[in-house]
Image: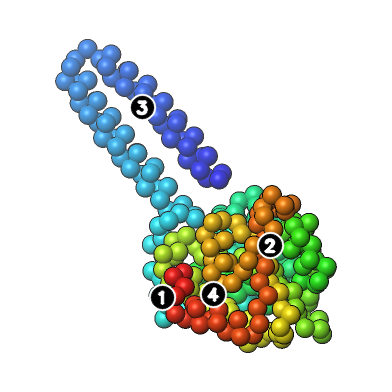
């Protein structure tokens, strides 16, 4: 945001400078000097505009990959949990570029992750983060408050989350993010992220037929994705503090396996 403002102010100053130069040039009495100077001025304006708008294409969060970032390849992908806080900061910045003011504060996300380090699955291609999925086991009271729309997402605290020492089955889960970098959204990245994260979560989890998952739908695309995986709307946006619809799923272990099968078969999911 700050770099954008600096660039725009620089552009405005340059524009005023060019306008002043234009009026100075047309005041010259000798025509050949006027025409030559105007030609040079036009060339300078074209070059300046090219670099200005070209620079915008490669801003963070833009649609075009920078020269250092490779094209997406499913064969080079790896899904794993976060290793450290620096990686968490990087994925938080991706969310910030998408959600803006609606994004949960970084300090809050750090407290969640410290409580349950397995809560974030990150998809890597070599050293590049492609996207991530975050899934948090909540205590019953916190889950029910989220489901009822009586608690905002950013009001979740570390005390609301079942930590790794939790001995009871982790029954209540909150799906907080399914995020893919914009430049990889038209690739297979989303399908691979969901498939690998689901497989890992099912493998590690202690599930019974009472497992419940809830999620907030931040967009029409997110809403369609939740419905595709068997979530049903539980609360309308107008009924929640976050002003976002709440979705609920109560899958059996067989339902979870069918979710995986849907992702494996892209013809049926069309992610």
The residue at the point 46 percent across, 69 percent down is 271
Q: Residue 71 in the image: x percent, y percent?
A: 38, 69
Contact, CB < 8 Å: mark 4 with mark 2? no
N-terminal label among 4 and 3: 3
Q: Which residue is mark 3?
A: 18
Q: Is residue 189 above or below residue 245?
A: below
Q: Mark 2: give few (<14), some (14-19) or many (20+) Cα within 10 Å.
A: some
First in residue order: circle 2 vs circle 1:
2
Q: Which residue is mark 1?
A: 267
Q: Which residue is mark 2?
A: 234
Give the mark nearer the N terminus: 2 vs 3. Answer: 3
Q: Viewed as shown, does residue 195 lie left or right of 233?
A: left
For disc 4, the neighbor class at 10 Å (few under 14, some 14 to 19, many from 20) is many
Q: Residues within 10 Å of mark 3 (few under 14, many from 20)?
A: some
| Residue bearing the label numbered 4 | 194
Q: Please report whichever mark, 4 or 2, sits nearer to the chain's N-terminal start.
A: 4
The residue furthest left is 32
Dots 4, 3 in contact, CB < 8 A:
no
Quadrant in which residue 207 is drawn? bottom right
């Amino acid at each position: 945001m700050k770099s954008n403002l600096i660039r725009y102010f620089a552009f405005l100053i340059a524009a005023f400078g060019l306008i002043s130069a234009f009026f100075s040039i047309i005041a010259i009495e000798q025509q050949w000097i006027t025409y030559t100077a105007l030609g040079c001025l036009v060339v300078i304006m074209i070059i300046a505009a090219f670099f200005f708008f070209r620079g915008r294409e490669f801003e963070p969060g833009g649609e075009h990959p920078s020269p250092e970032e490779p094209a997406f390849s499913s064969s080079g992908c790896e899904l794993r949990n976060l290793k450290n806080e620096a990686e968490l900061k990087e994925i938080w910045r991706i969310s910030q570029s998408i959600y803006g003011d609606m994004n949960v504060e970084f300090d809050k996300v750090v407290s969640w992750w410290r409580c349950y380090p397995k809560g974030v699955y990150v998809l890597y291609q070599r050293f590049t983060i492609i996207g991530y999925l975050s899934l948090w086991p909540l205590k019953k009271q916190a889950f029910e408050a989220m489901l009822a729309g009586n608690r905002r997402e950013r009001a979740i605290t570390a005390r609301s989350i079942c930590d790794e020492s939790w001995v009871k089955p982790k029954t209540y889960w909150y799906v907080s993010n399914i995020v893919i970098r914009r430049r990889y959204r038209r690739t297979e990245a989303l399908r691979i992220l969901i498939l690998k994260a689901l497989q890992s979560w099912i493998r590690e989890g202690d599930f019974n037929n009472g497992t419940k998952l809830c999620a907030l739908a931040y967009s029409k695309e997110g809403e369609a994705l939740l419905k595709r995986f068997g979530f049903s709307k539980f609360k309308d946006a107008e009924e929640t503090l976050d002003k976002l619809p709440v979705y609920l799923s109560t899958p059996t272990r067989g339902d979870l396996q069918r979710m995986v099968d849907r992702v494996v078969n892209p013809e049926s999911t069309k992610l």
